[in-house]
Every structure is written in C-alpha cells, then in structure tokens.
Amino acid sequence: MQAQARTTSPISELAPGDRRVLNENEVANRWGVSPKTLQRWRSEGRGPKYLKLSKRVGYPLESVIDFERRVLHESTYQHASA
C-alpha cells in the first residue's frame, strides 16, 4: 500500500477560527515557492502574518488564507487595474 501525501484542506473546508500553525516548509510547498522566498518576503514586509518564537517561524493558517484571499485575482485585467 502506498502512503498518500497529506494535502491542505481547501479554503471552503476549513473551520472558522482554525488555530493551526504551518511551518515555513508547509507554506512554501502550499504555494510552490522556496523557504528562502518566504524568508525574503518577511524581510521585505511582504507575505502573510507570521509568528516568531526564538528561531522558529510559524504561519497561522488563518493568516495564510487571508493572504491568499488578498492576492486572489479572477483575471489578469483585475491585476493590471489594481
């Protein structure tokens, strides 16, 4: 039997107020970017809100989803006119 990769639930399936925190690798995999990209975004003040406890960085799932909604575009026209 093959192990199935764990996938993140679609936005519509998440419970309101979900308190999960994703690590840097989970967010990078979710968006198809490298952890270095997330690190650069943090230094530039871009990307979702994050938590930093000591050297560990975490992204509250709610913040990740909020960021995804803010950058969601229905067409290239919307992006060009924004």
Image: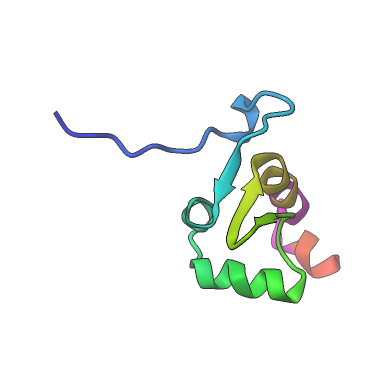
Q: How many marks?
A: 0
Q: Is residue 46 above or below residue 58?
A: below
The residue lying at 50 percent from left, 38 percent from top is 8
Q: Nearer the viewer, residue 48 or 56?
A: 56
Q: Position of residue 78 (x, y in %)?
A: 79, 59
Q: Residue pushed farthest front?
A: 54
Q: Quadrant of residue 14?
A: top right
Would you say 21 lies left or right of 28 here? right
Point out the stretch of residues depicted in magenta. 68-76
Residue 80 locus on image (x, y percent):
79, 69
- The color scheme shown is rainbow
Q: Nearer the viewer, residue 58 or 10?
A: 58
In the rendered image, the vertical position of residue 41 relative to residue 62, given as above or below: below
Question: Does the magenta segment cover residue 71?
Answer: yes
Q: Quadrant of the C terminus?
A: bottom right
Residue extending furthest toward the right: 82
Picture residue at 71% right of the left edge, 40% below the top: 62
The image shows residue 60 at horizontal and vertical percentages of 67, 44
Q: Is residue 26 left or right of residue 57?
A: left
Image quadrant holding the N terminus, namely top left
Q: Position of residue 38 (x, y in %)?
A: 59, 66
> Residue drawn 68% across and 43% down?
65
Taking the spot 56% from the left edge, 71% from the top edge, the residue there is 37
